Amino acid sequence: MTDEQMAIGVRGLAKRFGDVEAVAGIDFDVREGELFGFLGPNGA
């Protein structure tokens, strides 16, 4: 994917809630015109 097409690029995203590792180093790109949703198991 070229930089001109990419609106958002994420590398190594991680999120913890205390001792719980909810997200463990994911990578993703969102291109111009795309809609992206990142939902947990409870829909939040």
Image: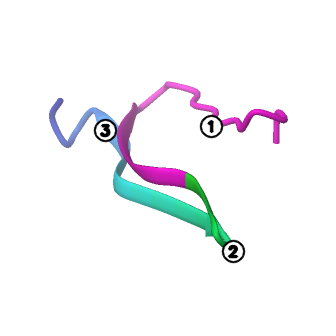
Depth check, front residue: 4 or 24: 24
Q: Which residue position is annotated with label 1?
A: 38
Residue located 64% across and 33% down the image: 37
Residue type at numbered disc 2? Gly
Residue type at numbered disc 1? Phe
Residue 3, position as x, y percentages in the image: 19, 43
Would residue 26 be counted in the magenta stretch?
A: yes
Question: In the rendered view, would you say 40 is above or below 16?
Answer: above
First to last magenta residue range? 23-44
Q: Nearer the viewer, mark 3 or mark 1?
A: 1
Residue 40, position as x, y percentages in the image: 71, 38
Residue type at numbered disc 3? Met
Quadrant in which the N terminus is drawn: top left
Q: Nearer the viewer, mark 1 or mark 2?
A: 2
Residue 18's disc is 2
Residue 6's disc is 3
Would residue 1 be counted in the magenta stretch?
A: no
Sequence-wise, the earlier of marks 2 and 3 is 3
Residue located 15% across and 34% down the image: 2
